Amino acid sequence: MPHHHRLAVSLLRALLGALALVMCLSWPRSSSAAPASAPRPAAADCDVIHGLTALDRTQRERLHRACIDGPQDDAATYTALFRLVSSSGWHAGVVGTMLRRHGRDSLTAWAEGRPHDAPAALVAQEKLDAGLSAFAAGTLCKEFRDSEALAEFLDAVGADEPPESLPFTSRFATCLGVPASTMESIRLLTIRADGLEDVTVVVGTRDYVHAQRWTRADALRLDGHRFFVAAVPEASPVVVLGTHENQALPVVWRGLVTRNEVVWAAAPRRSCLDLSVRMNPDTRLYFDGVRIDDGPEEEVCAAPTADATTKTDTDDPLSVDRTLAITLDQPGSGLPEHEISALTCEGRGTARRPVVRHLSPLPATAPADQLRAAGLCEAFRLDLGTPTKQRVAVLGVNKLPGCEATPLWASDVPERVRHVIGRDVAHRDARTYTNFSAYAEASEALSSLETRLGGRNRSDANEREDADANALLGTAAQEAWRQGIDTLLSFTMQCMPHGSNADGEPQWSYSIRATSIHVSGLFARGYYGRDGLDLEDFINVESVGFDTVEQQDAAIGALLDRTFGVTTPRFVPPPDHEPYRRPLTLRLSGWSDDPPGAAAEPGNETIELRYKSLYGVGEHLVDVQARRVPGSADRPAPCEMLVARGARLPEATAAAASTYESLPTKERRVVFERSRDDEDVSSDPRATVHKGEIYLPRPGWYLVTTDADQDGELDDAVCVDATSHSIDVWADLAPSGGPLAFASNGSRIRLYTRARVGMTRYFRGGWLGTGVSLGYGFTDYVGPRADWKDLDVASREEQQWRRHALLLSPHLEFRSRTRALPVEFRARLGPAIDTAMVDARRVDYALVEFRAGNDENAILDIDVDANLELSMGVPVGRIQIDIMTMLSHLAVDDSLVRSATTVVEDANMVLGFGLMISGGVR
Amino acid sequence: MIEPRPILLSVCGLALLGAGLTASSCVEVPTTSECELACSIASRCGMLPSALGGTAGASRRANELECITRCEASDGSSTEVDSLLVALGARAGDDDGELARMIARLDKPPLCGPEGTDLCDDLIAQLQSEPETSKLEVTTTLEVRMISAGSYVTNTSLRSWCCFDYTDEVDDDPANPMGNEPSTNLDELESVIELFGPTRSCLVELRDLADTAIGQIQNGDAMTAGATCEALRTRWPSTGMVDGNDDCRYAVMSSSLRALGLSELSCDSSDPMELDQAMHFVASELNETIKDWELEADGPLVDADGNIRDSATIHELIHDEIRDELARPHGFIEEACEDLLGDQGTDACEGLEAPDIKCVGGPACSKADCLDEDANAPACDTSKCETDSFPPGRECDLLGIEEIRLGYRTSRGLETFGDPITDCTGRTTIATVFEDVRVGPLTPVAVVTGTLPQFLVPEGDHGTRTFSWVVEGNVRWATAGQAVLELPSPLLEFLQNGLEDPLEGLGWVAQRLPTGKACDDEPGQCEGYFNENCHNGIDDDGNGLADEAEPWCDCLFEELVDLCIIVPPGMPPPCNCMDPKPQEGCPPSLPPQCTYD
């Protein structure tokens, strides 16, 4: 507040105080005289009327005008006042404010808008007021004055005990001159007024509402006690408002008077309330209609202030820290609920109007065992400030049926949300996560609210349903609002089974739905004003699907982006690995700040991605960064910080940008189009998903980045791993022989066929691997002897023998692993332990040396082979078919130049062409 | 192309690649040059395929390469291999390699000449005699096959048969056994031309005397006719002593003329009828003889004036007649000669060069050799390529053959026969296979038995007519592995006899039959004047003919022997027929042995 403005207010206060003093001294004491000590309420005190929820907007404005300009006795005033006196709570207390502000001691509003004959209660009250002074002096109705009943009554009052008898009865009234007939429908309400500066009694009947204000001077003094005796119609709602001389807060009694009754014979118990409220400077804070902040006294909308919904760093919040004595007594003590309300002004120019910033009740009664000692203060904290960061709380997480069997654990969703909001580059400066205390109550209310809002056939015109919805919001959102929470989030997890994997394990897809209630917007728009707001405007539902539990963080991040309208695109839930032979589908979730329905700009239709390989060809084996990080999922170090995909850590994004720039590998660019797929289209047209495929040229990790706004800073980055299956099981079959078999002294292999089943385990990068194979080799030899042996056996027909071999071979394999070519090349080499049984049945027995001295036809032969296979293959579905060239040096332990000099010397070079089947696109 | 020999280090290097290698792989192998030389000798001597290398049915070239490959894979340090290399001249040794070195120095394939053949035969014998190499078995699977005479002629000597010439008759064909060169340029026809004139004069004179006597009888002058008969009888030489100027000096040698009994003619004029019959008989027989001997006027030997033609004309006429006989429609080798000579017929013989056979008398090329176009100088007889041979089934029927036993004869005269083959008429193949036959020059032989057909039996012969002929083919080198030796049916020898001897061809003497088995086994059993067994009533040689029926009992054959036209079976040619003649000169000619008393 400006300094000169404060000075003017102080001067105004001083003038008003002087004026009141002059009036008090100069004006004769009369029933209509204003109380001398009561300060006249300021205009700002009338603003509390804007928070009277029992009234509609028109009534509030009319009553507020009456408070400012003076009360009227027309029918509208009656209606408003009767609703106030009939409603629960303290709201009728504003009548006292009006009377005090305008120095009036009574107010009568007629239902018909015009005066009637004086009702019996007013006639009786007049007689009573006239006779009480004489009664107190003992000049009138002395027998009553001296009666034991009065003495006992006064004794009990003096002991702060409920009196057993009440002397102020119809007889007393009659004694003071009230006609007996008048008292037929009148009951006397005796009010103990010790310590009260004034008392206002508001009575409402079918015909009129009457408010009577007494000051302490008007009280009946008996033995040091002061009393007011009010004549009220039988069974009419009555509100008594007492302003205590030492208390900031009034004492309110509310009830129907069906018989003569005494109020506050024993002073109502009081409790201590430590009120700590944090609010903007332009906010007015009221407790039971009494302004308790030290702000300016002008009306809340008198001076231009910042928009309540606009949060600026210059609006330093105020703190109102006060200890209040509030009434808290047992039920039946006639104490209505307390109410704390905060008002602020909304709108611009002529549209400015007060709105309720906060409104919450506080109990005024409690069971006897729950009554606190007067010295035990209850803390009540209220945050009504407009923080620079939006406060977000998670109301609850609900797992729909079907998720029980899944590995998804919903209980940690709030913590994940906290992580995202607290650390994500797009969230952490704009909002903050806060806990929501009244969880159980609010969640139940919100759940009911969701159920109700979920009905599509809900009619906005249905007042009753609106009222119910409002009540629910009043429970949950209001509590959240009271705690300074701007947005309430509720999550629902849905789990859909979709078959099983190869191991028979059930597979799931998940969907997480966020229901957000923008509480700040709801209340800032004047929810308490009963303006018929469409609640759906404040409730937003977004959902994101994902396939694996590991993608949950990213899904939550994307969900929060949509919920809060974050325009920075985000990779949503990216599969962090994909076989390099397959295109990797990536999605970027974003949010367009274009108004719904606006023509999409071309820039929003596409997003360019850039990506590089983290490692050059072969660097996997030598780059220490590529080695397995303990505890990580085989992920290179630069990607570690990008793992927490729920939160795009600024330092991670910066590190990714730095890493990306330093990568010497080739940069590739790809443009993603905005996806129109069903799964990517949200109910919110501003939620966008850009989808595309990138082709990773070879296995390994890639850093994919996007800078959608092209400001030179990465918006998001993600590491993806183009995988190649680390284990490949293969089978090959290659025939050879005839002209494809070579030996220096002539190959005698007519047919060589080798069938093997093997397994290769690849090192990182997938292009180098080792493995082992087991195979069967069949060799059919036909030919003459190979050297000068068995000379005594002349020329013979060509000999024929066969070899059945069991081949056990370790191997080293190189694999091209690149998408640059439509085919894949493989080279495999290694030795083989060749254990064979030679079938020499068809070898002439006369060839003793050629049979290696064996008479038996089954001859064991163990050799060592050297194998080299070159293949070229293409994936065909789940398998890969390779055309293979086999080059094997059989029996390297036998001399190639002396091959087949015996049936167990079988060194040969064989060239074969065959097929190999192995794992496909993996 | 011989592949480069991998070095020993590479062998060991490869061996080191394997785990737990055996040191046995690192053996000392012979060098490529050693193996090439050794296998070249083995191949040139037909020792492949054998344990040294090669496969049956493969070409010589391939076998040699395979031998080299085997050699290079052999353990050169072993005694056997080392000895083989030494014996085959590939490694220095004692004198064991001298034969191989001699073979290597030959300027032509050794098996294509007698010298090389002998050297190779000796080399094989040496290998078998040495203990280190005696294990080496160089054998073959020999198939002896009898084929038709036409097939045989077509395969071996078609040109000489189609272009028959007595100067270079069928015996001078390129497939002359073991490369024996034709001994002389003797023209057999020229040798016998001198027989024609006096013999015709003799026969005409005798016939005229007979005709005169017949006229005289018809004129009733029996007495004069008796004198004329007496003159005819006295004109015919009655003893073996014939004046060298007597026109009847040759005719008297003929068995058929002697059978007329002119010297014992009865000229009794008292019985004119008998005299007339005798004169008619003599005149008729003489006319028949003149006709059969081609001595009638305007024949191939005598012109229209009754004069003996000049030798050139006789040559031309005789040759044309024989050629026509061989190549005429439905002739013996008509189709083959037509293929050889074309439309020009025998006129093409003038410019027809001798076939370019690089290995005359060598082993027949195998099919693989024939297909080896790269073989510029195969050590085998390429004349056997692309020929078809047919079994002599029809000829068996023609000659009355009932059983055939096929066999072979080594250079050392050892004969081996297989099981008898009967019913050769219905067989598609007449062959016998012999396993493990030692390689070397082999002669296919056959013993053919049967009964002479009627056309081969002279009138009046009363023998058993059962025959047992010996037939031989040309001697060839039987190479290792597989070898095929062909021999003709007996018909060929029968035909050949008639062609090589002009008198047999002209019908002056009976045509010789194939050699009898007994004659082949023992020359003394050969039936003929030279063994003086022409009157014992026994078919001594077993060829089906006995005594006078045996051609060799005709004394004209002695004249033919003296003229160096034929050689008696089992006997050497006369000294003056030898070429070259002995340096010491021939002894004086012996008086005629043939008696025609």
Image (cartoon, helix red, strand yellow):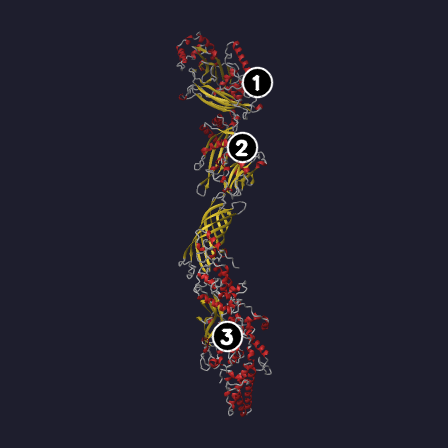
Q: Which residue is mark 1?
A: A4
Q: Closer to the camera: disc 2 or disc 3? A: 3
Please provide percent x and percent y for residue B582: 52, 76
Give residue B493's mark.
Answer: 3
Evaluate whether label 1 is on the same chain as label 3: no
Give the image quarter of residue A504.
Answer: top left
Give the mark nearer the N terminus: 2 vs 1: 1
Q: Nearer the viewer, residue A786 or A96?
A: A786
Cα–Cα gap, marks 2 and 3: 120 Å
Q: Does the image show residue B118?
A: yes
Q: Is residue B310 left or right of residue B27?
A: right
| Residue A622 placement (x, y as % from top left) | 50, 42
Residues behind callouts 2 and 1 on a single chain = yes
The chain under label 2 reads A
Q: Is residue B70 above or below residue A535?
A: below
Q: Disc 1 marks which amino acid?
A: His
Read off the residue under disc 2: A566
